[in-house]
Amino acid sequence: MAWSERQLAMLRAMGVRLFVPTAPAPAPPERPVRPATAPAQALPTMPADMAQGEAPHVLPADAPLALPVATPHALPAAVAGLDWSALREAVAACRACRLCESRKQTVFGVGHEHARWMVIGEAPGAQEDVQGEPFVGAAGQLLDAMLRALDLSRAADGDPARRVFIANTLKCRPPGNRNPQPDELAACEPFLSRQIELVQPRIILAMGRFAVQSLLRTNEAIGRLRGRVHRYQGVPLVVTYHPAYLLRNLTDKARAWEDLCLAAQVVEQDRTDAAAG
C-alpha cells in the first residue's frame, strides 16, 4: 500500500518508523479465490523492523468469524428503547452510583452515530470530566493520530465508513482517577450497551484493561487477548492497549498498530462479503 504524506506524518506521530524496502518483497503463496467475491483492498501491515513479540493471528479472507461470544446483561426496559436524545438525557441525569456525587459532568461519547468503527475506553479522566468528551489531552491526541493513520475521524458527520464513535465503559470520572469499581461498571453498562445497539458498528476496538475485561467478561490480561477477534453482542471486537498506557510504554505502540491493522482487516472483510452478496 502506498502511504500518503499525511499518513506517514501520523505514523511518525505515533512513534512508528516505516521501513521502505529497496527491492520488491517476494510474492505470497497463491490462495484460492472464492467465486464472485470482490478483491479485498490491501491493508497496511506492520513494518518488519517494528515488530514486537509474537505477530497477531491475521484472518485470511475466507475465514469465518465464528468466535466466542460475551453475553451482556439484558437491558433494563427504561434504557432498551431510548433513542440518542433520550439516552443522552438519561446519562446526564443518572444517579445510579456514587460517582454522580463527585463528577463535574457526564461524558456521554462523541463521533458519528452510525460509524462503522466504535472505540470503547475505560473511564473519564480529569480533562474529560471538565470537557465532557472522551479521550482528550495527550492520550486523545495519540488516539486521533492512530485513527488518522487509517483515514478515520471522530467527526460527527461525513462518511460513516471513515468515522468512529468513541465511548467509555464509565460515563463519570472516578475520584482521583482510581480504578472503576464493579458496581460502577454494572450501573453504566446498560448505557454503553444501548450505544452499541444504536451505532451498530462493524468493529469494536476495546482499549484498556477495564474496558476489555468488562466487555468480554474475563480476567485475562490484554496481552493474552489481543491478536485475535472476539465478539460482543455479535459485533467483532479487537483488543488493544489504552493510549495513556502507550504514552508510558512506547515499545507497545508497534503492537497497538498491529491491533488496528487487524481491526481494519475485519472491516474490509465485512465490506467484501457484503459486496459479494
Image: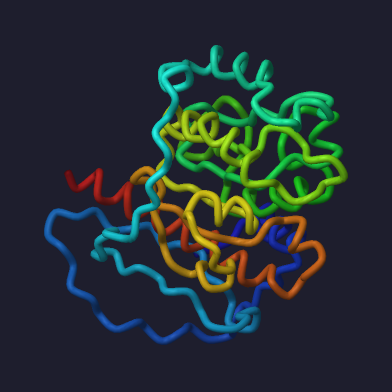
Residue 100 higher or lower than 216, as above or below: above
Report whether 32 appears left or right of 235: left
203 or 28, nearer to the observer: 203
- The type of colouring in the image is rainbow
Q: Residue furthest left?
A: 35
Up/down of 96 relative to 164, above or below: above
Residue occupying the point 24% across, 44% down: 275
The number of numbered discs placed on residues in the rendered structure image is 0
At 62% from the left and 46% from the top, the residue drawn is 182
Q: Looking at the picture, tell me which residue is in the foreground, 54 or 25.
A: 54
| x and y, in percent, of residue 195 in the image | 50, 30
Q: Residue 15, position in %: x, y?
A: 76, 67
Quarter of the image for the C terminus: give it.
top left
Which quadrant of the view contains residue 191?
top right
State which quadrant residue 254 falls in: bottom right
Residue 82 in the image: x percent, y percent? 47, 16
Residue in the foreground of this view, choosing between 218 and 138: 218
From this view, report whether residue 275 is shown above or below residue 102.
below
Residue at 53%, 51% in the rendered image: 205
Percent across and percent down for residue 160 are 47, 33
Q: What residue appears at the point 62 percent right and 40 percent down from the top-left corner?
A: 183
